[in-house]
Amino acid sequence: MFISKLLFISFVMYAQAIADSPKNVSCKVSRVTTESILITCDIQPSFAYREYSAYFTSNNTTWNFTSEIENNCTSERPYVNLTQFNNKQTTCLLKINTTQLESGDYDIKLTASAEGNDFSETDVERDSIRIYVPKEIQTPVCTEPQYDEENCPSWPRKTLCILCIAAVPPGEVDCRLFYTSGSMTGSVYNFGAKPHMLADNDNSYTYAAKCTKTVTSSMLNDGIDIRANFTKYIDYGNTSVRSIASASFFFVTPKKINFTVNDNPIGVCANIGENVTLKCATDGSPAPRKFLQLGPSLDNVYIVNDFPEPVMTWTIISSSIYGYFICYADQYEQRISKSVYVVAPDQILGTESQKNYKLQYTGHNYDTSYVLIGVTGCPEPSSLTLFRKKNNNVKETLTDGVALSYKSTPQIVKSSNQYKALGFVNVTFLNKHMTLDSPTYFLNLSNGISNYTIFEFSVYGAYNSNATSLSNSLTIFLLVLALFNVFNF
């Protein structure tokens, strides 16, 4: 809470009880300087033959100023200006010198009355403003970098602006911003920081001062440390005391984002009516704004929602929800994103009509080979079995010399008007002799949704160890022969 004195302004209107009585009185602080505060009160609608009175109360002392609406009402303390436009709106300007603001409660009232045969008055409207004026400089606050043409005008190219504000007593205030970004250091000195009014939603204001620093995207990418110092000399009788307040802030663009569904970084399958748990976390300082996008769905619908908390629960209300879920983080001209998917449970199916796969080799001796078989379905297969076809169509179960694994991907494919999870089965042959003579294999897969899905396939490109040995021997012979010719030349 600010150590402050309170300026309380109320606008009270009295008028003759007629159908066209004044309504909608609205007051606001329209301008502030180091010397004065200007308050505007609008009255709608207005009518002729009205007399306004202004009351300014401080420390039980009251100044009363009265004027008819045709004339400007002026006074030394405070200054009141009344104007009327087309008998539809009356604007009252109230100017208060900041040197008059002392510790205590301040009450300013404006009343209006209509002349006529009936001199009775009726209270028809009222509006209030509260202005806090601290006795000492309060801890400053620096806003996140943003485009701000009012405080950091830039042309022809827009630049990002850091605005630092501190609640201060009226008068001259100095501000200095020290910054560090990567290997760059410096400071911005604002002698006579600009006065400012901090407005709250409840029509309350706080007297403050502000200063600014423009920044670039590269500075935010490296991260920028800002230390704001506000200084003011405050007179206490014959003594002048230096009041100082400072605070530090750090701003950096987000670079990493972690998004999961049911703790899975790729995707899950869920039935209609089930809930899924979405978690989205990013780096960056302060925490960037996040939002969730659903889509494109089967109906090519995009749904965007704020993602204010780290965890969100989402209900799959219909099949149109199936598809990609994307978490975005926006901050300082930087946007990063990550997607996961939610699809309907479905059996394992093949993605291609191909039945003959070329072997890929690993290892220094070409002793290990593998093929990747594309499949769709969710959840991932829990049972994988490989058979080899022998004579008379007898299937031999292979357990030794082979390894089977499933690799999920972050991709989904649209098939039969349904999104399906895409993955690959890695069939690895640990023994190179198992792939000779182009044998036929049967791969049985099941994920519990239905019976086994059988894939029949063959392989080609088997490594011929005899041919390679002969080639290696010939190479060695030719090398020895060449060396022999060199030494005998």
Image: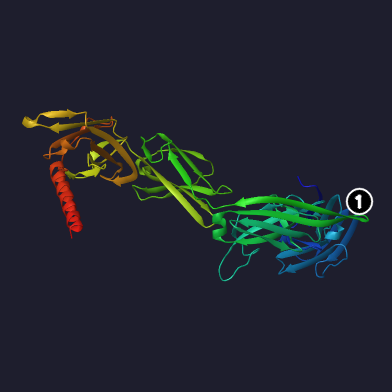
Q: Quadrant of the N terminus?
A: top right
Q: Is residue 23 visible?
A: no
The residue singled out by tag 1 in the image is 60
In the image: residue 200, left or right of residue 423: right
In the image: residue 176, left or right of residue 115: left
In the image: residue 404, left or right of residue 251: left
Q: Quadrant of residue 36?
A: bottom right
Residue, far left = 392
Front in this rendered view, residue 296 or 442: 442
Front in this rendered view, residue 464 or 438: 464
- Display coloring: rainbow
Residue 342 is situated, as x and y percent measured from the top left of the image, at: 37, 40
Front in this rendered view, residue 329 or 367: 367
Question: The residue under label 1 is which amino acid type?
Answer: Asn
Q: Is residue 355 above or below residue 252?
A: above
- Residue at image point 25% right, 36% down: 348
Mark 1: which secondary structure? loop
Residue, far right = 238
Residue 467 is situated, as x and y percent measured from the top left of the image, at: 13, 45
Q: How many marks?
A: 1
